[in-house]
Image: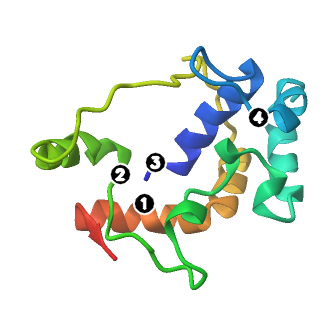
Amino acid sequence: MRDPVERFRSAFAYAQAGGSADNCVSAPFRSTYRAFRDVDEALDHLEAAVWPYGVDHIFRPQSWYVTGADGAPAVDHLVTLADLGAALRTLAPWAAPLREVNRGPDRKPLLTSRQEWRLRYLYAHDLTLVRRARDDGVCAA
């Protein structure tokens, strides 16, 4: 699990760039996302989406991928991005090493407190899952 505010900042920069050297924003969203004038326009787009497929996967809540219909984790463990290195070292005997791919631009937008509030509202379930993963170290479902 990644902090949703930091994940959004990264996704916004990635969206405006049209992707990275490794991957592109999906075609149906590419021109829209490259044309965002600012963070508020991107947030308006997210808030207007009526279903998960109304936004590219880079902006979908992480909870959409790891929870069931009841909102409970549908995976055995959740790990924060900050704890990923330790988790991978634990799994090293069974897992192949991961390489970093799809790194987006390093220049990410600064956010106002209002924009952060909007993000925390949009990604409230993600924030709950991140807190659980941090509190538990590794969060058992």
Q: Tag 2 or tag 4, which sits nearer the N-term?
A: 4
Say if 50 sits above or below 9 in the image.
below
State the image coordinates of residue 45 (x, y, percent, origin top left). 87, 47
Per the model, the C-alpha gap separating discs 2 and 1 is: 6 Å
Dot placed on the residue nearer the N-terminal end, 2 or 1: 2
Residue 5's spot in the image, x, y percent? 57, 45
Residue 40: quarter of image: top right
Q: Are the residues at dot 2 and dot 1 in contact (C-beta closer than 8 Å)?
A: yes
Q: Which mark is residue 2?
A: 3
Q: Are marks 3 and 1 in contact (CB under 8 Å)?
A: yes
- Which residue occupies 68% across, 46% down? 57
Q: Which residue is mark 4?
A: 26
Mark 4 or mark 3, earlier in chain? 3
Q: Is the residue under label 3 in contact with that under label 2 (CB below 8 Å)?
A: yes
- Tell me: residue 6, above or below residue 69: above
Label 3 sits on a secondary structure element that is loop
Whole-angstrom CA distance, mark 4 to mark 1, is 27 Å
Residue 80 vs 85, above or below: the answer is below
